Every structure is written in structure tokens, then in C-alpha cells.
Amino acid sequence: MTVSLPATIADIQRLLPHRYPFLLVDRVVALEPHKRVLAYKHVTANEQFFQGHFPGRPVMPGVLVVEALAQAGGLLTQLSKQDGDDMEQLFYLVKVDNAKFSRMVVPGDRLDLDVELKRQIRNMAQYVGVARVDGEQVACAEILCAAARA
């Protein structure tokens, strides 16, 4: 599938199986195939997780920031595929290493997701992701995903 940038939410929904409320990427703005992707998520006060995390002091859970990085990694893999590649293959999160959180993400933030492919071996891909808000790092992690047939 050929997708022009910026990739919209409709494009993203064709590439990833995630749907609301668990689709955590709104747009892809830059791509170096097989190397790097830059995407973002607009964090709004309407997010379901803010109802319980935390009432009166909404904070995006760190695990969802890492999930957003993993989804951006999935988009890097999907957008790097050539026509005719197996588009029915899905990548599942299998490991997270060195996750660090340095600032809270709150409603009104735009979460910038910068993900690099560190290496790919057979059906496994390792990504290094950095999440930023207003240019300031809020989280980072190494993410390992494994492919399986849909």
C-alpha cells in the first residue's frame, strides 16, 4: 500500500488494527523507510483513561506513552513495506527495556513520537523510541516486537 505523507488517521487505520480508544497515533509526518518514523498524538481531555488517571489531575499513563511508541514502530514497519509484501502480518509487543519517564503528559499536549528501527531479524523488530512534548523528552524506551499472521 502506498501512503503519502502526512499519513492521516484514515491511512493509519488501514495500516494498524488498533481502534478507539486504543489507537494512539493521529498522524505520521516523516518517514525514512526501514530506518525512522516521526508521528504524533494529540492528547485531549476526552481520553477515557483520564477519568481514572487521575480525577482532577489528569496524567497520561506511562504505559500508554510506550504503547504509542510501539504503534509508531508498527507504522514504520508497515509504511516501509513494498507492494506485494505480506500486509497480513501483525507485530505484537513482546518486550520493553530501559523505559524512562521524565515528564508528565497532560491534556492539551501534542505527544511527538520519534522511533528508529534498531535492528530486524527474521520475524522480530527492535525499535528505540523517544516521546517528546514541545521538544522536551517525556519518555523513552527500547521496544521489541514479533510478527505473527493476522
Image: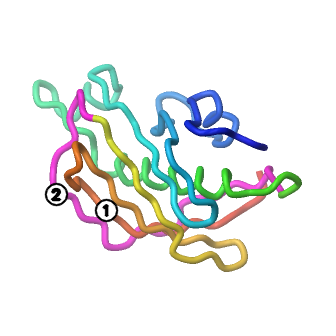
Q: Is residue 47 above or below residue 84?
A: above
Left or right, residue 130 beside residue 102: right
Circle 2 is placed at which residue position? Answer: 102
- Locate residue 74, reporting x and y percent: 59, 54
Dot 1 or dot 2: first in sequence order is 2
**Callout 1, which amino acid?**
Cys
Left or right, residue 144 beside residue 47: right
Quarter holding the N terminus is top right
Q: Residue furthest right?
A: 84
- Locate residue 109, reporting x and y percent: 25, 34
Say whether marks 1 and 2 touch (CB < 8 Å): no
The residue shown at (59%, 50%) is 75
Q: Which mark is residue 149?
A: none
Q: Nearer the viewer, residue 6 or 26?
A: 6
Report the magenta residues as a range.
Answer: 86-109
Judged from the image, the secondary structure of the residue bearing numbered disc 1 is strand
Residue 64, magenta (yes or no): no
The residue shown at (79%, 56%) is 82
Q: Residue furthest left?
A: 56
Q: Which mark is residue 140?
A: 1
